[in-house]
Amino acid sequence: MKVIGIESSCDETAVAVVEDGHRLLSNVVASSMDLHAQYGGVVPEIAARSHIEAIIPTVQSALDQANCTWDDIDGIAVTYGAGLGGSLLIGVMTARTLAISKGKPLYAINHVEGHVYANFLTTTSLPTYKMPKNQPEFPLLALIVSGGHSQLVLFRNHFDYILLGQTRDDAIGEAFDKVAKIIGLPYPGGPSISKKALEGDPYAFKLPKAKLEDKYSFSFSGLKTAVLRLAQEQIGEDFTFPSTQLPERLSEAQKANIAASFQRVAIETVVDKTILAYEEFTPRSVIIAGGVAANGELRRQLSARLPIAIEYTDIKLCTDNGAMIATLGCFKALQGQPAADPYSLEIAPNLSM
């Protein structure tokens, strides 16, 4: 069973071929991040135009890397939500057209659910990939953390899950981006904060953790505001001082200590909830998924605090990629899930789990 997966929910045009839900045959990503960096975030119109230019060559590159032709492909999987409307449209229309013209079944994939399935890939002949030795076992606890999502989900089996909690406001990745901007670090904020934090003291400053009635929900807006007030205080200014002028006034040591302290508290926030859920539901496996799953501090804290071993997928499979979409498409096909109608599949920008 070979499935080609197409992912275009944000700024990366990504296509991959996966076999039997565990073997990665190809993984090609055409990123437009450099075009967005100067704006400090993704510009939807630029992202959509980049997808138009990249989508067909990326599909062909993925087939070539997998040493496949369309005759070898058993199905097409595509992200239809959640994401940016214009970006999703390019991927879905491409997949619909290919499904009709090539006579292949089409599987509609939830982007957030797809992130979880990157952890089911265990084998590849592609160089530089470090894969888990074993697939996760059910029941499975998944911490999904990215620029747009912060969710804690309990999977009883494939396609059988309950959402335990999610963010009330900013996703954790979005908070990383905003804090990076406050202290003058480049976009994307996650890697920039992690790098700068290595120079600082994670206990230099005391920052708050949100306390919510729902024990599995997250909130990062208060932490983000606390960082802003801290940065203003560090240069001797009050809350009226413009945030845009903070980077030029903060020293490199101050930036490093703020980055390290913020990262520690943000990561502790999601790890605390994960440990709480583990103790209540005692799953057989725990995984992390999404772009923030590449964060070294998150991996360190979870490994230190979980009473069971946890395996992490390759960092390249944490950010948006076609491999996770193809893998979930494989399981949909193998588990007899219904295919989508290639003549009528619509995008769902606000899709949730």
Image (cartoon, grey):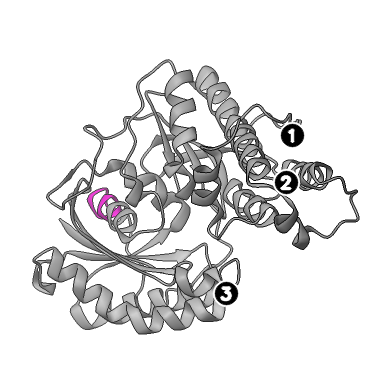
The amino acid pointed to by label 1 is Ala
- Residue designated by label 3: 43
Residue 113: give x, y in percent of width and height.
43, 50
The amino acid pointed to by label 2 is Lys
Residue 346 badge: none
- Residue designated by label 1: 210
Question: At x 49% / y 33%, what residue is drawn?
Answer: 297
Q: Are the two marked residues, 3 and 2, in contact with CB atoms closer than 8 angstroms?
A: no
Which numbered disc flags the more N-terminal residue, 1 or 2? 1
Q: Which residues are magenta?
A: 330-336
CA neighbours of label 2 inside 10 A, class few (<14), some (14 to 19), many (20+): many
Residue 305: give x, y in percent of width and height.
48, 19
Which numbered disc flags the more N-terminal residue, 3 or 2? 3
Residue 224 badge: 2
Which numbered disc flags the more N-terminal residue, 1 or 3? 3
Nearest the viewer among 93 and 59 is 59
CA neighbours of label 1 inside 10 A, class few (<14), some (14 to 19), many (20+): few
Q: Are the two marked residues, 1 and 3, in contact with CB atoms closer than 8 angstroms?
A: no
Residue 332: give x, y in percent of width and height.
30, 53
Up-down relation of residue 312 to residue 240 (above or below): above
Question: At x 70% / y 54%, what residue is drawn?
Answer: 182
Using residue 127 as the reference point, say whether residue 99 is left or right of it.
right
Please, what secondary structure does the residue beneath circle 3 have?
A: loop
Please, what secondary structure does the residue beneath circle 1 have?
A: loop
The Cα–Cα distance between marks 1 and 3, rounded to whole angstroms, is 30 Å
Residue 209: give x, y in percent of width and height.
72, 32
Please, what secondary structure does the residue beneath circle 2 have?
A: helix
The Cα–Cα distance between marks 3 and 2, rounded to whole angstroms, is 22 Å
Magenta residues: mostly which secondary structure?
Answer: helix
